[in-house]
Amino acid sequence: MPQAATVLVVASSRLRELADEIDGTAAAEADVVATKRAAQERLAADSTIDCVVAAQELPDGAGLDLLAQVRETDPSLPFVLLATDGSERLASDAFAADADDYVPVDPAAPAVEEIVTRIDGILEADRETRRSRQQLETIVETVPEGVFVFDEDARIVGGNETGAEMIGYDCKADVIGTSIPDLVADGVFHEEVVEAYLDELPELLSPETDKETTTFEFRAFPGTDDERVFEVRTTLRPADGEYRGAIGVIRDVTERERRREELEQYETIINAIPDPVYATDADGLFEFVNDAMEDLVGYEFPDPQDKGVYLGMTERDLEKSRELIRELLSPDTPREKGMVEMDVITRDGHSIPVENHMALLPYDEGYRGTAGVLRDISEQKRRKRRLDVLDTVLRHNLRNDMNVIIGYAELLADRLDDRELLSAVERIRRKARDLIRIGDEIRTLQNTIEREESDRERSTIDAAPIIDRVVERYQADAPQATLRAEHPEELRVTGDSTLQRALADLIENALEHSDRPDPTVTVSVETDCAPPRSAASDDAEAADWVAIRVADDGPGIPDYERRLINGDEDITPLKHGSGLGLWVVSWITESFGGDVTIESNQPRGSIVTLRLVHGDPPE
């Protein structure tokens, strides 16, 4: 049962029966005083008064004056004015002063029951208003945004605790009475908020607008380490044709603004990239392209938005792209990105070969689309065609001509008896075979260069069986030599099958140039070794590295050639090494992201070390 309302009755003895009638109801109880002064003291001492019922005629003044004084301190306290000498003018003055009711009273026979009924109605309406206000206050305190109520002078007269905390106050009571200029002076708001606030209000006040809210942003705590960006939605306070101030709902959008600034920075960076860059949604429609992409295809986006990736792609290339996406989406695929070669058909119908380096957009619940970088490989394709022609002609003619020379040399060897001439013939045959081998090495180098230029994703292989195969092969070819292989059972490294060619060249070089009748070559492995000198990036330094060492006991690699391979000396027309073998080894290893070093073996011979990234075994 709700607590009974307290009604302060301010009246002479002639209206005391009104108090008795109020006390007789279950909804209210009366507190009676006889003078205006007593009423003021009672109101100042007790905040539980729910309604004031005052006679106009009081011993020390008028009830209308008491009403004016009450409204100065409590604009919403219900007030009923009783007039024993009523008039239309008095009634008008009472309502103008914001009385809740005006009741003319016959002092000889006051209609007490009617007055009590009207008071009950006012109290019930006030209770309903209070309930609604409490509900609204609860909602305002619950919302995550800050709420401020400003009067016509931009002074805060209400709000919620969240708003006070957002601007650095302990509670909303501390911020009540503070104006926007005060907050600017205290360094809480940037001065731009004053101009923005004053600029937006006229639009809301204009009789020609149907706009009810306006939004603007401003900075808080400017120049500090905790500078924030607030977004405020402003609406006018309810009023009867007069401006009474505004209500502002403030939200902290600092992180949103930072993300927007970061996005703008990324867009600037991406537009500075010379390669075309794009992003698509799950349906293949473009969500972003950079300037280079527009220049490549000849379209200004988002004009062809409805076509997406289908713009300028053949069905064959589309299927290749779909297959890559399916592969990247598969839980069995550890890769996060991939590459397909395709042709882009420009707006004017030209076909441009490109590499499409593609990655999936981050997703939690489902496929969201892709991001990609296109690399124009037209020049690379043209260069490859030219190299293929030169390679075919050079190697074919070189091999054929050298085979002819070898054939004639063997014919001469069969018919000559002179030792000096036979030695010269043997030298001719050896040099011819060297030239044939150089042709093969050129092809290997070409393949290595093409692999590096294509920038394809590196893979991992198990180097242990490769080492075994190479050692077994050369042990069979050179039974007088001793070849050893010392390595763990599994040795995954970054590389591909050309690692076998590099190891074979090293072992063959060691056996061929050995001055011992029974040479020894050892292939050993060191895991968790130090990164090479070429590992300049943080990622390379943080990687695990493996060293594969080929050690021999021969005369050793010439010092100048060792310095060339180690990068300690530049190549010149007079200093370029004796052949391509070590360069093949070096370039193959570098194409895997590793490097090659050469040092002296003790007591004699050389040690060639291949450092490679240690790859994890496949799951």
Image: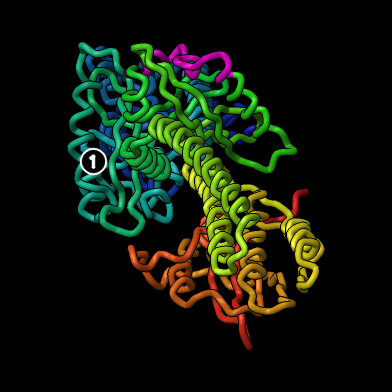
Q: Tell me the crowding category of disc 1: few under 14, some 14 to 19, or many 20 or more residues within 10 angstroms, Cα based.
A: many
Image point 62% across, 53% down: which residue? Answer: 410
Residue that numbered label 1 is attached to: 193
Image point 33% across, 35% down: which residue? Answer: 271
Residue in the foreground of this view, choosing between 540 and 566: 566
Residue in the foreground of this view, choosing between 177 and 580: 580
Position of residue 587 measured from the top left corner of the image (x, y, whole percent): 51, 56
Image point 67% across, 65% down: which residue? Answer: 507
- Residue 311 can be seen, yes or no: yes
439 to 348, vertically: above or below = below
Q: Is residue 294 left or right of residue 285?
A: left
175 to 380, vertically: above or below = below
Position of residue 250 measured from the top left corner of the image (x, y, whole percent): 38, 38
Q: Secondary structure at mark 1?
A: helix
Image point 56% across, 55% down: which residue? Answer: 588
Instruction: Please identify the quarter of the rendering in which residue 27 is found.
Output: top right
Question: Which residue extends farthest bottom?
Answer: 603
Position of residue 188 measured from the top left corner of the image (x, y, whole percent): 29, 52
Position of residue 478 measured from the top left corner of the image (x, y, whole percent): 76, 66
239 within the magenta span = no
341 to 589, vertically: above or below = above
297 to 398, vertically: above or below = above
Magenta region, residue range: 300-318
What amino acid is found at the position of numbered circle 1 in the picture?
A: Val
Residue in the foreground of this view, choosing between 234 and 28: 234
Main SS category, magenta section: loop
Q: Quadrant of the N terminus?
A: top right
Q: Is residue 66 left or right of residue 417?
A: left
